[in-house]
């Protein structure tokens, strides 16, 4: 991989697909994608939304409202299945683990839609591949 961020929808999906391919090729422990913070959506102190992928599992933290949107999104991707929900008492949200078995392009499309539909980012949001 030679670039690590993108804000154009086509370029973001290409970046995400390249990151999945690099993750698989390198057999790295995980890959992390972060979206640009939006104080209007995220609040002042909240971290930027992120998504991790390891082997065949996406991992993300969501609020109650975002969890509803995750469920809706997963219905559009038959290759994806929510496997685990964890809501520790000390946490304000839910950690979601989604099994996703598909090619890099389809996984990239899913990741992009997580940021668009679950985290409410605009079509031109900037995302970074923070770790591969």
Image (spheres, grey):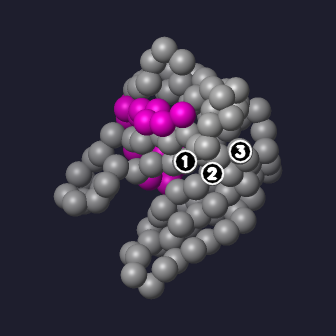
Give the farthest residue toward the bottom.
89
The percent coordinates of residue 114 (x first, y second) are 54, 48
Q: Secondary structure at mark 3?
A: loop
Residue beneath the point at 41% across and 26% down: 5
The vertical placement of 108 against 59, above or below, is above
- The boundaries of the magenta stretch are 113-132
Q: CA distance from mark 2 to mark 1?
A: 6 Å
Q: Is residue 57 left or right of residue 124?
A: right
Question: Any mark on residue 55, and which?
Answer: 3
In the image, residue 6 lies in the stretch drawn in magenta: no
Neighbourhood count class around disc 3 (C-alpha, 10 Å): few under 14, some 14–19, many 20 upward: some
> The C terminus appears in which quarter of the rendering?
top right
The answer to whether one can see residue 116 in this image is no
Question: Any mark on residue 52, and which?
Answer: 1
- How many numbered circles are shown? 3
Does the residue at mark 2 contact the one at mark 1 (Cβ under 8 Å)? Answer: yes
Residue beneath the point at 57% across and 74% down: 86
The percent coordinates of residue 67 (x first, y second) are 54, 66
Q: Secondary structure at mark 2?
A: strand
């Amino acid at each position: 991989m030679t670039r690590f961020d993108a804000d154009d929808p086509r370029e973001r999906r290409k970046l995400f697909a390249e990151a999945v391919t690099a993750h698989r090729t390198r057999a790295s422990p995980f890959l992390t994608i972060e979206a640009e913070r939006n104080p209007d959506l995220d609040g002042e102190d909240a971290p930027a939304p992120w998504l991790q992928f390891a082997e065949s599992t996406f991992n993300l933290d969501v609020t109650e409202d975002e969890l509803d949107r995750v469920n809706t999104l997963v219905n559009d991707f038959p290759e994806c299945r929510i496997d685990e929900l964890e809501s520790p008492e000390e946490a304000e949200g839910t950690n979601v683990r989604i099994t996703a078995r598909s090619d890099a392009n389809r996984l990239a499309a899913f990741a992009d839609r997580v940021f668009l539909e679950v985290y409410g980012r605009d079509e031109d949001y900037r995302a970074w591949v923070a770790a591969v």
